[in-house]
């Protein structure tokens, strides 16, 4: 049975703290949303929000063409005591040019009386008149039954009447909204089933087209959606990466993967499933929200294995410790190397970057010894794949040497200025050998690490122009033995990028500058190596 996918990222998802989508951002997200098999895309509330009005105007002008997905405009029923024909908000929805109009309607009688401050009968008339008017204008109409589960629990008779009124007026679908996000899966399943029974028994509406819209306040949005589908819902709503206000909406990527890979429902093709991970990460770039590594199916840690026992079993059969094939959703298995890892983990991890250690007990023994000794000193390779690869290549004799460090130093000084307590600045000097020459360069920066980075880059770019595309994009510091106070060992994790990929290196030292220098130099070595640059020492 086909399950329709309805995406609300551009409206509901945009309400998340930290997300501020421009019209261009919304247009850029359209093909991503459709690429995973979405049937309906809700773009916003034209007429009520100027940015959303512009979005629909630009789509009508030819920007952001959709394929098979239908564009939806969101709005509300007419105001109490006002004619639908004279409601400007409804007229704006029609003028948007959207294929479908979704109206939010009150289905909890308490909200009708306390929030709308109108009568139960007038609320029913608002639903009836609004749907009928839009149908007269040639629009397909859907109804978001706001606070459905809370309302059904309090007064199932009235909530059912709101749903029945929607269908009788011409709505193609009514969506059960868990607006407060507090329902549990068993309750959702029971209420959807009971609603279907009431509609058939009391109103003669059999096999209605019902949708589910869940929020994640109780951590059950995806589970509630699945429960609703098994109870008879044929449309699922959600957002990319679970974006949304408070704790977010149901994660549409997880819903699609679950239904496609673990049930007999039809929701996405294999090709659409394979795009889930790429769509998730691209959406993170557009929204400027960092990807969640532990997100089901599409996170970088979704198929990451750390313990040695897991690795030994995975070497025999990867499916022993993975619930699905990661390639099915465009992801991949990843081995994490740590002091918990055995030789099997290291062998599998090395295979990821093209080094076959099978049958090389000597190499595996030495790499394992180095890793465990390093982690005892404070290093961690869980999230520093680049540093781990450099260790492996060093052991097997395949680590390239791009430069030799003669000396380096970093200074932090304060200029005397009695008016405003002076100005602090950082300066670093680096002496290296590369390209057959000796280079000494001075760098200034915001802090000693930035100054070292500037000095090192300036020196190396005389020989390796490829560094122009590389940059340090993240820098994290952790104090390991805090009881030692200011003399504690420091660990630094650096993330670098070249526009095509990112990589992480780690350094440990008696102070943050020493640890940073190690991570920094390894980062540039790895970047040059991955770019295919030949050493010019």
Image (spheres, helix red, strand yellow):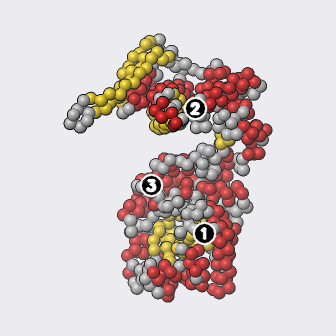
What's the residue at 58%, 74% (across, down)?
Answer: 149
Q: Position of residue 64 (x, y in %)?
A: 46, 55
Up the image or down, 286 lies above or below 530; here it is: below
The residue at which mark 3 appears reads as: 19
What's the residue at 36%, 33% (across, down)?
Answer: 446
Question: In the depicted view, which residue is nearer to us: 339 or 33?
Answer: 339
Find residue 401 and name its label. none
Q: Earlier in the sequence, mark 2 or mark 1?
A: 1
Numbered label tally:
3
Q: Position of residue 297 (x, y in %)?
A: 64, 50
Up the image or down, 170 lies above or below 37; here it is: below
The residue at which mark 1 appears reads as: 183
Question: In the depicted view, which residue is nearer to us: 411 or 214?
Answer: 411
Q: Position of residue 363 (x, y in %)?
A: 71, 23
> Judging from the image, what secondary structure is the residue with disc 3 in?
loop
* Extreme residue toward the left, this view: 419
- Marks 3 and 1 close (CB-CB < 8 Å): no
Residue 10 in view, yes or no? no
Q: CA distance from mark 3 to mark 1?
A: 26 Å
> Judging from the image, what secondary structure is the residue with disc 1 in?
loop
Which of label 2 and label 1 is nearer to you?
2
What's the residue at 61%, 63% (across, down)?
Answer: 220
Sort mark 1 into few (<14), some (14-19) or many (20+) by Cα contacts within 10 Å.
many
The residue at which mark 2 appears reads as: 378
């Amino acid at each position: 049975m086909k399950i329709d996918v309805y995406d609300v990222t551009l409206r509901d998802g945009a309400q998340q703290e930290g997300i501020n989508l421009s019209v261009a951002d919304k247009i850029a997200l359209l093909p991503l949303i459709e690429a995973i098999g979405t049937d309906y895309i809700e773009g916003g509330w034209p007429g009520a929000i100027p940015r959303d009005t512009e979005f629909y105007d630009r789509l009508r002008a030819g920007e952001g063409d959709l394929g098979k997905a239908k564009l939806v405009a969101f709005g509300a029923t007419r105001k109490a005591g006002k004619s639908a024909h004279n409601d400007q908000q409804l007229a704006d929805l029609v003028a948007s040019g959207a294929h479908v109009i979704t109206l939010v309607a009150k289905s909890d009688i308490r909200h009708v009386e306390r929030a709308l401050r109108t009568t139960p009968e007038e609320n029913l008339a608002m639903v009836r008149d609004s749907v009928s008017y839009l149908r007269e204008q040639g629009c397909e109409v859907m109804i978001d039954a706001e606070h459905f589960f809370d309302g059904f629990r309090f007064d199932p008779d009235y909530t059912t009447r709101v749903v029945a009124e929607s269908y009788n007026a011409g709505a193609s679908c009514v969506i059960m909204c868990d607006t407060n996000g507090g329902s549990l899966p068993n309750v959702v399943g029971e209420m959807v089933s009971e609603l279907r029974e009431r509609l058939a028994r009391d109103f003669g509406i059999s096999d209605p087209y019902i949708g589910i819209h869940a929020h994640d306040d109780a951590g059950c949005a995806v589970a509630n959606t699945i429960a609703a589908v098994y109870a008879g819902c044929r449309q699922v709503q959600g957002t990319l990466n679970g974006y949304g206000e408070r704790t977010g909406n149901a994660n549409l990527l997880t819903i699609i993967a679950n239904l496609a890979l673990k049930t007999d429902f039809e929701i996405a093709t294999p090709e659409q499933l394979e795009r889930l991970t790429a769509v998730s990460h691209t959406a993170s770039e557009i929204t400027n929200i960092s990807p969640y590594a532990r997100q089901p199916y599409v996170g970088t840690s979704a198929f990451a294995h750390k313990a040695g026992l897991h690795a030994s079993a995975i070497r025999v059969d990867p499916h022993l410790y993975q619930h699905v094939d990661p390639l099915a959703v465009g992801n991949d298995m990843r081995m994490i190397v740590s002091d918990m890892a055995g030789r099997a983990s290291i062998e599998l991890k090395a295979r990821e970057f093209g080094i076959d250690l099978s049958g090389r007990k000597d190499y595996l023994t030495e790499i394992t010894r180095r890793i465990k000794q390093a982690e005892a000193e404070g290093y961690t390779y869980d999230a520093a794949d680049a540093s781990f690869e450099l260790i492996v290549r060093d052991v097997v004799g395949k680590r390239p040497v791009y430069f030799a460090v003669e000396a380096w130093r970093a200074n932090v000084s304060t200029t005397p200025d009695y008016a405003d307590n002076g100005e602090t600045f950082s300066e670093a000097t680096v002496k290296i050998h590369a390209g057959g020459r000796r280079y000494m360069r001075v760098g200034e920066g915001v802090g000693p690490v930035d100054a070292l980075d500037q000095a090192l880059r300036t020196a190396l770019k005389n020989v390796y122009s490829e560094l122009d595309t590389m940059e340090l994009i993240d820098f994290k510091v952790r104090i390991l033995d805090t009881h030692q106070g200011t003399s504690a060992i420091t660990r630094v994790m650096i993330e670098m990028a070249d526009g095509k990929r990112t990589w992480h290196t780690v350094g440990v030292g008696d102070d943050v500058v020493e640890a940073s220098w190690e991570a920094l130099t390894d980062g540039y070595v790895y970047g040059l190596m991955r770019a295919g640059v030949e050493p010019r020492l």
